[in-house]
């Protein structure tokens, strides 16, 4: 088994934690200077490479650095868009990184001892979705939720009006028509809001 550290361009630990949770990557997020990394323990070299490939897809055009210690050797490589681009001399990579990375690889420090660490197990999928949501998307979600509530209430009014109206109450039919109009408008607004969110 081996210890793997993947150093990523994510500057905020919560963002990397959320991305890993949504991608079903299990480990502990740690600050690495101006960047963040994920530490995977008791994994095979192959699992470390798979994790680096998956995380590199989340990093977009940026590279991630994989460091895997197996026995007495440290393997290092750059990944981009899900593929290994190049090997990197481990010594050179470690010289350009904070000491905590080497300590993690040598297991003189554990991930849960690093200040600011975030185990991916501590974050739910819902929390991860919220953490990766931009302010614009959050506003869209709130607007859509508001119109969904309006649509539900309008549906209740419509059903109530029809139920009473079937008994011959003309006013109830007016209420039902108003409920139908509001329901239709609310559904239209929900559609517009969601289509606007998809286009962003």
Image (tube, grey):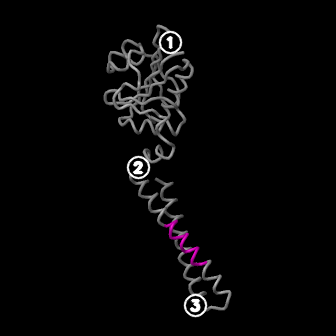
Q: Which mark is residue 134?
A: 2
The mark closer to the camera, 2 or 3, is 3
Q: Say what secondary structure mark 1 lies in.
A: strand
Q: Is mark 1 in CB contact (under 8 Å) with mark 2?
A: no
* Residue found at x 41% / y 13%: 106
157 inside magenta stretch:
yes
Residue nearest the viewer, comparing 120 with 81? 120
Residue 134 image offset from top left, x and y in percent: 41, 49
The span picked out in magenta is: 147-158
**Label 3 or label 1, whichever comes before in sequence order:** 1
Closer to viewer: mark 3 or mark 1 = 3
Label 1 belongs to which residue?
70
Q: Which residue ends up furthest to the top in the rendered image?
A: 72
In the depicted structure, whether residue 11 falls above or below residue 157? above
Which is nearer the eye, 159 or 129? 159
The answer to which of 180 and 60 lies nearer the viewer is: 180
- The residue to which callout 3 is attached is 171
| Residue for point 60% across, 80% down | 160
User: What residue is drawn where x is 35% and y is 32%?
Assistant: 116
Q: Secondary structure at mark 3?
A: helix
Measured in 3D between alpha carbons, the distance from the residue under mark 1 to the one under mark 2, in whole angstroms, is 39 Å
- Where residue 149 appears, as percent x and y from the top left, is 51, 67
Specify the quadrant that holds the N terminus: top right
Residue sitting at x 40%, y 26%: 112
How far apart, in angstroms, are the residues tagged by discs 2 and 3? Answer: 46 Å
Tell me where residue 142 appears, x and y as whole percent: 44, 60
> Could you tell me which secondary element the residue under label 2 belongs to?
loop
Residue extending furthest toward the right: 166
Q: What type of secondary structure mainly makes up the magenta span?
A: helix
Depicted 157 relative to depicted 200: above or below: below
């Amino acid at each position: 088994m081996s210890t793997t550290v993947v150093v990523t361009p994510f500057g905020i630990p919560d963002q990397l934690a959320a991305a890993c949770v949504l991608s079903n990557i299990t480990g502990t997020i740690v600050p690495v200077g101006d960047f963040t990394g994920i530490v995977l323990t008791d994994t095979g070299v192959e699992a470390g490479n798979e994790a680096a490939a998956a995380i590199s897809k989340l990093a977009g055009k940026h590279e991630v650095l994989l460091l895997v210690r197996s026995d007495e050797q440290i393997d290092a490589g750059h990944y981009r868009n899900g593929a290994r681009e190049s090997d990197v001399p481990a010594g050179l990579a470690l010289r350009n990184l904070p000491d905590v990375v080497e300590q993690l690889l040598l297991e003189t420090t554990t991930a849960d001892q690093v200040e600011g660490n975030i185990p991916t197990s501590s974050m739910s999928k819902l929390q991860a979705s919220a953490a990766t949501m931009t302010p614009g998307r959050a506003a869209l979600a709130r607007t859509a939720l508001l119109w969904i509530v309006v649509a539900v209430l309008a549906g209740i009014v419509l059903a109530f009006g029809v139920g009473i109206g079937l008994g011959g109450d003309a006013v109830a039919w007016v209420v039902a028509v108003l409920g139908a109009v509001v329901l239709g408008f609310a559904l239209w607004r929900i559609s517009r809001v969601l289509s606007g969110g998809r286009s962003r």
